Image (tube, helix red, strand yellow):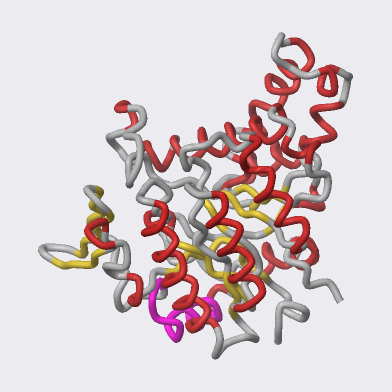
Amino acid sequence: MSLLTADTIDVHAHAVLEETMGAAGAYGPELGFEAAPRFRVGDYILHGVRYRGSAFMDPRLRLGAMDAAGLDFQVLSPNPLSYFHFIEPRMAQDFCRTHNDALARLVAPHPERLAAFAAIPMQDVGFAIEETHRAVHDLGMLGPYIGTDFGRRLNDPALDPFYATLTELNVPLFLHPAPLGIDGPPGDPNLRQFDLDIIIGFAAQETAAVATLIYGGVLERHPSLDVCLSHGGGATGYLFGRMASAARKRPWSPDSLRQEGAFEALLQRLWFDIHVHAEESLALLRTWVNSQQLVFGTNFAGWDQQIGNIRAEAQSYTANARRLLRASA
């Protein structure tokens, strides 16, 4: 089995790495246990999620759980709690190198089942480009995996050299939000209860990313760039009509987006994982985006992973995943 021959491919599966503990100095990460498991990043503490002794950290447990779920292949990605997009650039670069080396070592014994995406220090574009080259060329990783917020807007022209690098390397970019205030701005205080920063905040960041990539001209400036967003692009399926209408009517919209169907055409360029939790939500998303650019994701071993054997559902997205991951025969 391999990425070329797997019947089911999961592109949304985070890993936590023992070798990265303390690799960002005082920021952590740090694993502990008092009354329950604890994971600290800076001043942010996640309680109650068991990483050690789970599929997040133990590849043997992961492979066994993949078998039970009917998943042949996973591409492992950085834990969104430890992107470290707002710490000092040099420290972030060092952390990402440590992370990517460790993740490459984790997947190396299992090439028939596992591959990896790279952590990238996005607070410095030069460092981001350098680590992307190293991760792809030296470590065999499939592309960068970053947050939606790292101190620059996604349409900032300063990021154009990074996007150009991805097209030159012929690798996709994966976007997945981080919880608010991990190592950066605190965000909306209304999202500080009931896990709303994850339940609603993630969707808001993903939807904003879709709009920014289109309104901000990123997809027009980089016509070969492939970007995949987590969780169906947040509320994109629901807000599609409002976003398209704004592209035609609002004063800031460029001439290229004012034509009927222009927004819709660029939306067709984006990729989305289908981890949206409801068939009705997925049906709405399918109405507006390119169904050939939907891929299967699970947030594997997380609180919201699909229950039971999901092989039948995953199989219909496998050909799409191979194209996105440049694994077509």
* Quarter of the picture holding the N terminus: bottom right
Within the magenta stretch, is there residue 67? yes
| Residue ID at (52%, 68%) | 308
Work out whether residue 287 can be spotted. Answer: no
90 above or below 267? below
18 sits to left or right of 164: left
| Residue ID at (38%, 38%) | 197
40 sits to left or right of 202: left
Work out whether residue 165 can be spotted. Answer: yes
| Residue ID at (56%, 34%) | 153
Q: Position of residue 229 (x, y in %)?
A: 62, 47
Q: Quadrant of residue 51?
A: bottom left
Magenta residues: mostly which secondary structure? helix
Q: How many marks?
A: 0
Name, please, the residue furthest toward the left.
34
Q: Position of residue 19 (x, y in %)?
A: 35, 77
285 above or below 319? above
Q: Nearer the viewer, residue 240 or 115?
A: 115
165 above or below 76? above
Within the magenta stretch, is there residue 237? no
Q: Quadrant of residue 256?
A: top right
39 sits to left or right of 293: left
| Residue ID at (49%, 46%) | 177
Give the magenta part as a residue range: 56-68
* Quarter of the picture holding the C terminus: bottom right
Q: Position of residue 270 (x, y in %)?
A: 74, 44
13 sits to left or right of 222: left
136 above or below 181? below
Name, please, the residue furthest toward the bottom.
109
Q: Quadrant of residue 29?
A: bottom left
